[in-house]
Image (spheres, grey):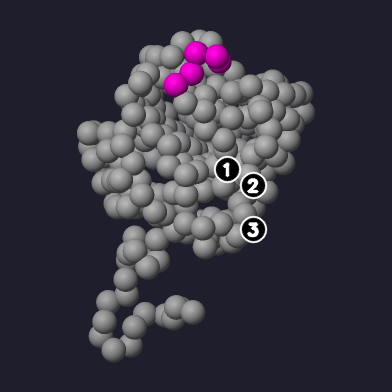
Amino acid sequence: MAPTGPPTDGRTAPPLESSSMSMLDLDKFRATPLQHDPYDFLCVPGFVKKEHLEALHRDYPKVDKPGSIPLGVFPQGPSFDAMIEELKGPEVCKAFSEKFGVDLSRYPTMFTARGMCRATDGKIHPDSASKVITVLIYMNPPWEATGGRLRILRSQNLEDYAAEVPPEEGTLMCFRRSDTSWHGHYPFEGQRRAIQMNWVKGGVYIWHEQWRHRIGAWAKGVFGGESKGY
């Protein structure tokens, strides 16, 4: 087990992003080509390293409602916190900046988590214009259902798709937002975990979205409702 305190012999403790401590396989991410049909996206199964999955399942936010929930609304554990900190870090920002050819250090990040899916979720949409890059990390067992598989769409037709992504544990899906970055999935009802990270245009948008999602989570719990698809 790694020591819990700083080194006592004058050495410097390794950063979180060092290869021995990283929870994320950035080498696999860098080696995966960016797809351009119908828009810029890529999918990386195994982006979250296998040895960390058990702890992340245990520490995932206890989301028992549909919709995108801001972090901190439901209890979450230390390994989940550690992964979020790594996602916020400079190595991840650099890797995504190089992949998409945009300096993402200029943009703040926003995080939400999903835990439950309703049969009315998965509506086709391109994402808000305030988003620059959308990142999804799925945290589910091997996916047998036909519904709930995210499709990268060429149009507002679920059958007109370039790729289909089962939302299985450790899988990353990311894309550059545009007016035609259509995506969605066929209905599924039950547990469907996904972490969403966005680089966005400005902190005011984050504040607005965090409050919108908090109110939305409350409303869905009381009145029901539907969500867009990730």
Q: What amino acid is labelled 2 in the image? A: Pro
Q: What amino acid is labelled 3 in the image? A: Arg
- For disc 1, the marked residue is 168
Query: Percent from the top left, x then y, of residue 193?
Result: 61, 41
Foreground of the two, 146 or 190: 146
Quadrant of res 199: top left
Q: Is residue 149 left or right of residue 204?
A: right
Identity of the residue drawn at 44% across and 21% down: 162
Asked whether the residues under the numbered discs 1 and 2 touch, taking CB atoms below 8 Å apart as contact, a structural biologist would say yes
Q: CA distance from mark 3 to mark 2?
A: 13 Å
The C terminus, quarter of image: top right
- For disc 2, the marked residue is 141
Identity of the residue drawn at 68% across and 23% down: 187
* Region rendered in magenta: 158-162
- For disc 3, the marked residue is 58
Q: CA distance from mark 1 to mark 3?
A: 16 Å
- Sequence-first disc among 1 and 2: 2
**Residue that protrudes farthest toward the top in the picture:** 156
| Secondary structure found at label 3 | helix
| Secondary structure found at label 2 | loop
Foreground of the two, 199 or 182: 182
Magenta span has 159?
Answer: yes
Label the magenta part by its dominant secondary structure. loop
